[in-house]
Image (spheres, helix red, strand yellow):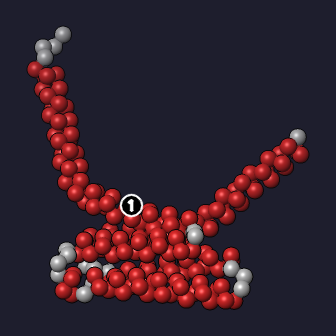
Amino acid sequence: MSDLDAHQNESASSTHSGLMSLLWRQLPFVVALVLAIAGVAYTNISHQPLVGYWEFLALAIGVVCVVTKWPELHSRDARLRLIWTQAVHWVAVLIAMNIVLVSRVQQLLPTPATSLVLLTLLALGTFLAGVSLLSLRICFLGIAMAVTVPAISWLQQSVIFFVLAAVLLIGLGLAFWLRQGDDRASAPPN
């Protein structure tokens, strides 16, 4: 019986270890996605553009791209090419972001729209980095960021609908609840 318990404990431990290893490998991608969504949420609440935040996030994703691909490359030339191509790629993304942030362009966009445009540029840059690195995880991160843009936009427009629907349901619930109380009070006692 102790051999069976030991085998089950070993199997559970290896499954837990495998799951932790998988989560650890996916952590940079999840953190990048959460930070991107948090940046849009903060911008929408504060109505202040987070210029430095988006630049930091673009550089951080660039570092994640290099670190993700680094172990697969064995020659010094391949690693230098990786650093060089990713640096040029992410500088181009930063330039595009800063073009959006030029005061004349920013005057045309409300602050929440600016954050969505910056997230779109970041998503495009991430997806294209994934394509150039042949990394499905980085491509998926770019796609996930891109999908959040219309989702956030839809949620902003739907909040009023959800609030009105909740008020309607609460009002109907109170009306029926109060009516039941009135019916009980007006009913003759048995």
User: What residue lies at 20% left-to-right and 44% top-to-bottom?
Assistant: 165
From what the image shows, is residue 175 above or below residue 102? above
- In the picture provided, is 51 more to the left or to the right than 69? left
User: What residue lies at 52% left-to-right and 83% top-to-bottom?
Assistant: 86
- In the picture provided, is 96 more to the left or to the right than 187? right
Q: Do we see residue 52 in this rendering?
A: no
Q: Do we see residue 115 in this rendering?
A: yes
From what the image shows, is residue 84 above or below residue 114? below
> Residue 95, position in %: x, y?
36, 87
Check the image and name the residue furthest to the top: 190
- In the picture provided, is 79 more to the left or to the right than 55? right
In this figure, what is the number of numbered marks? Answer: 1
User: What residue lies at 55% left-to-right and 66% top-to-bottom?
Assistant: 137
- In the picture provided, is 112 more to the left or to the right than 7? left
Residue type, numbered disc 1: Val
Depth check, front residue: 35 or 123: 123
Query: Which quadrant is home to the C terminus?
Result: top left
Depth check, front residue: 48 or 13: 48
Corner quadrant of residue 168: top left
Q: Which residue is mark 1?
A: 147
> Residue 172, position in %: x, y?
17, 36
> Residue 161, position in %: x, y?
20, 50
Corner quadrant of residue 15: bottom right
Tell me the element at label 1.
helix
User: What residue lies at 43% left-to-right and 79% top-to-bottom?
Assistant: 57
From what the image shows, is residue 54 above or below residue 32? below
> Residue 11, position in %: x, y?
78, 51
Depth check, front residue: 99 or 50: 99
Query: Which quadrant is home to the N terminus?
Result: top right
From what the image shows, is residue 179 above or below residue 12? above
Pointer 1 local density, CA inside 10 Å: few below 14, some 14–19, many at least 20 = few
